[in-house]
Image: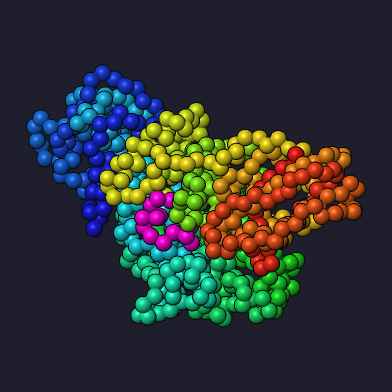
Amino acid sequence: MVKKYLILSILLLVASSTSSGQIIPNPQSIEEGEGYFVWNSPARVINNLKDKRFDSVIEYVHLLPDSLVTFSKRHNCPIIKLAQGKPNDFVNGEAYELYIKPDAVEIKAGSQAGLFYGIQTLLWLRGISHGGMIRCATIKDSPVFGYRGFMLDVSRHFFNKEFIFKQIDLLSSIKVNVLHLHLVDTGGWRIEIKKYPQLTSGTAWRTHKDWREWNRAGGNFIPENEGGYGGFYTQDDIRDIIKYASLHQMEVIPEIDLPGHSSEVLAVMPFLRCDGPTSKWTSEMCLGNERTYRFCVDILNEIMDLFPSKYIHIGGDECNTSAWAGCSLCKELMKREGIKSPNHLQSYFTKRIEKYVSSRGKTIIGWDEMLDDCLAPNAVIMSWHEDPDGRDKIIKQGHPMIISSEGHFYLDYYQDYPIVEPICFGGYTPLRKTYQFDPYEDLSGNIDLVKGLQCNLWTEAVQTPEHAERMIYPRILAMAEISWSGAKQKDYDEFASRVKEYGNILVRLGYHPFDISGEFGPRPGSNIPVSSLSTGKDVSYLKPWSENFPAARESSLTDGFLGDWGMNGMRWQGFDAVMDVTVDLKEVRDIHSVQTSFMQNSFTGMFLPEQFEIQISDNGSDFKTIYSLSFNARQNMEYCIEDFGWSGSNSCRFIRIIATHPSGWCWLMCDEIIVS
């Protein structure tokens, strides 16, 4: 099994090509020499690797296809030497040096990871060569960040281990070194736990494959033998994945989402649910119940025994505290421990879990919501919110951080014009935006605490392997280049030309990347400042914006720029079913038009308003209506952007816009308010 999938990786890099393109990610230093190393027949591999630490890379090389390398003493064949360098010569543990000469190639490194990455670079050079003619050169290379990750959500939709092997082949070739598996969530429990077999027998299969259809039908789980959709990894499957990843110098990090996102746990273990009046609508485990802590420790014991990774991800995001607020056991805990409010209960939970995980020699990672309270001191924070102030806060508090910026590295978002794309989760992140990310922008303090970057593929809308690969590639190539080569002196057009070449190879090898050569591009006008009487003017909020979509807060609706295709970024501001805002023009002005836009993405619960009204006033107190509209919100339309507004002749100082949706549960996403 291992050999079968490893060969896929090699075929990727030796696929027929006549292009003179370059490597992804770009090496730190390349000095071209004279002449060529000719590799058009199996190369003889020799090494001086006596240290046991290099056994994994030797095993990897021995599994390469016979058509590529040989270990026999053939004469007149290409020579590739693997050499162990002195530790002091390679301060970075993943660094390597590659010396390409006419008579032989030497790869030198102080670690097996360095040798592995040197091999990947050499294979890539052979793949883009003309008939195996590799230009002589000296390459000295090492990564900027030690953590270069990819997260796959296998709870919302399950992907078998063969799919994971296939992605490891490709990801390791671009020097991604962490595979983060989001193993459990509301969509199903996906890993065998010996002590609690009911977790998989009771929640690994559900009534519908489609995420929305399943939720609309009640979100019910069913036994495997009733023909439902799902699956899970046995512990032997996980060992296979870990072994395969280790041959590719990748660490596998498990995520067990705690204490929220746990409706699948509560479905089979209802005694872990709070007893308050709102608990049946929430997915949080009861933090006042000692059985919760025993359950978590039991689960984590099996996870830590199974995964050799340094890190254990415990989630910790998006917890709804309302269940804890009304629970008698949680109230007793708060009184006993002097906890001031339900919002502080998660900190109590996290500190207990962190202390136990640390006692086992592991380190917890959690999403950045864990920072909202006094955090466990040794936790690593995975920062997914786009707010640079939030990342700066993490650094100032002294926590190591992995940046997984929603607006740049969330792969479940659209990468082109949504009308022509498969259903996605509402955001818009084209390759250019991912590539333009600067991990150090607006940060102060000890920036060495930034350990690396990670792309995430959440799979609510991703049902098939083909769709998953379309979402992963090519955007993860941009993250790989930033995290390995660095963020400075980037040329997107040059990078895009390499991506196009890479994409062609992927297609020939059975992957399904998005083709950037046919991009429609950003929303027209979104990169051009808007000329408006309202630009820069104050906005008063009679109804607050949603904390889920604050955008740029008070300045969002009059910042002078249109939003793009997606809700991510700083332009589209969200409201919980009711928007009621007033723009102050500072003086009475003649007006002839008031326009704004709303976005619908039904998959994410964003809908156009069904009632829309514009009012004006000279004094800010007495308003009159100049326009109103009852609108059919087109509930069945997946995605659209609609303009709403008035044209005519009037005068005023204050302009009030009221928009509502009668359901009361959706988000209204509003764009720029333009007055002329």
Q: Quadrant of residue 570?
A: top right
Quarter residue 545 falls in: bottom right
The residue shown at (44%, 75%) is 207
Q: Nearer the viewer, residue 294 or 470?
A: 470
Q: Quadrant of the N terminus?
A: bottom left
Quadrant assignment for the C terminus: top right
Task: Note whether 239 is above or below 395 in the view shown.
Answer: below
Magenta residues (range): 453-471
At a point 22% along the width and 24% down the height, the residue shown is: 36
Instruction: Answer with the quarter of the image where residue 115 lies.
Output: top left
Answer with left or right where residue 238 lies relative to residue 549: left
Whether residue 176 is visible = no
Tell me residue 633's x, y (percent).
62, 61
Depicted 130 relative to depicted 628: above or below = above
Relative vertical location of residue 476 with respect to residue 543 in this rendering, above or below = above
Q: Measured from the top left, where is residue 6 in percent x and y?
A: 26, 50
